[in-house]
Image (tube, rainbow, N blue to C red):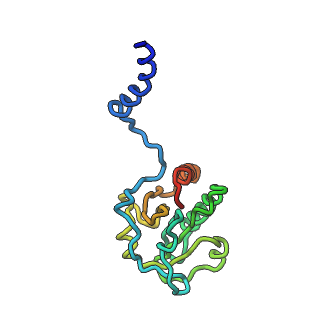
């Protein structure tokens, strides 16, 4: 009888021992997790490209992949736009749960061919000072270097590194969509 109890209790004892004594050091995610309670979407002074009312709050209920860049959109900016488009497509039937947003930090006009090429990416103008005060970045990088992820409740929750690996990003986003019942 004691042998049966020991066999049944062994997995539970091993799991507690592993969790509380050995403490796993590795993490399972590629992007840097950000405490969402500290970074809800503030009023950033955003507007649509035509000057109309628009903001990140309009996307509540959807996951948002967010990139920040100037209107000239150099090669790194175009690469992030391409990566975001492909990541959304890679989600398959879940892709409707993900929106792509480009926050333009200046008043420079956008190239119409670029706008057509990345149709479906929402482009908003934003007050750069307010934006930089909101988005956390790693030491030695700027907000323009990262792609950020905002949850369906409107909280910033993940930051991907500079020049990210799209395969690893896809795994993170897929896990979040699978685990989340909202958005």
Toward which corner of the image does residue 155 lie, by quadrant? bottom left
Left or right: residue 83 compared with residue 156: right
Left or right: residue 110 compared with residue 69: right
Residue that lies at the very extreme toward the bottom in this rendered image:
51
Residue that lies at the very extreme toward the left in this rendered image:
21
Toward which corner of the image does residue 154 lie, by quadrant? bottom left
Tell me if I can see residue 148 in this picture: no
- Of residue 80 and residue 127, the one placed in the foreground of this image is 127
Left or right: residue 33 compared with residue 78: left
Tell me if I can see residue 58 in this picture: yes
Q: Position of residue 139 (x, y in %)?
A: 35, 58
- Of residue 136 and residue 38, the one placed in the foreground of this image is 38
Residue beneath the point at 50% across and 76% down: 104
For the N terminus, the quadrant is top left
Q: Position of residue 24 (x, y in %)?
A: 39, 36
Q: Position of residue 58 (x, y in %)?
A: 51, 74
Residue beneath the point at 41% across and 76% down: 44
- Of residue 156 and residue 129, the one placed in the foreground of this image is 156
For the C terminus, the quadrant is bottom right
Q: Position of residue 112 (x, y in %)?
A: 64, 80
């Amino acid at each position: 009888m004691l042998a049966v109890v020991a066999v049944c209790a062994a997995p539970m004892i091993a799991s507690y021992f592993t969790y509380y004594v050995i403490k796993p050091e590795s993490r399972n995610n590629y992007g840097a997790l950000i405490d969402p309670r500290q970074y809800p979407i503030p009023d950033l002074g955003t507007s649509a490209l035509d000057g109309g009312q628009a903001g990140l709050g309009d996307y509540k209920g959807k996951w948002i992949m967010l990139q920040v860049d100037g209107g000239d959109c150099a090669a790194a900016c175009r690469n992030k736009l391409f990566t975001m488009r492909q990541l959304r497509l890679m989600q398959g039937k879940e892709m409707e749960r993900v929106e792509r947003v480009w926050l333009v930090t200046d008043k420079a006009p956008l190239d119409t061919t670029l706008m057509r090429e990345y149709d479906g990416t929402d482009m908003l103008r934003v007050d750069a000072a307010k934006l930089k005060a909101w988005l956390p970045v790693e030491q030695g990088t700027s907000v323009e270097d990262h792609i950020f992820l905002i949850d369906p409740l409107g909280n910033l929750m993940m930051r991907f590194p500079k020049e990210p690996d799209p395969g690893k990003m896809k795994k993170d986003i897929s896990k979040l969509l699978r685990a989340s019942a909202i958005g």
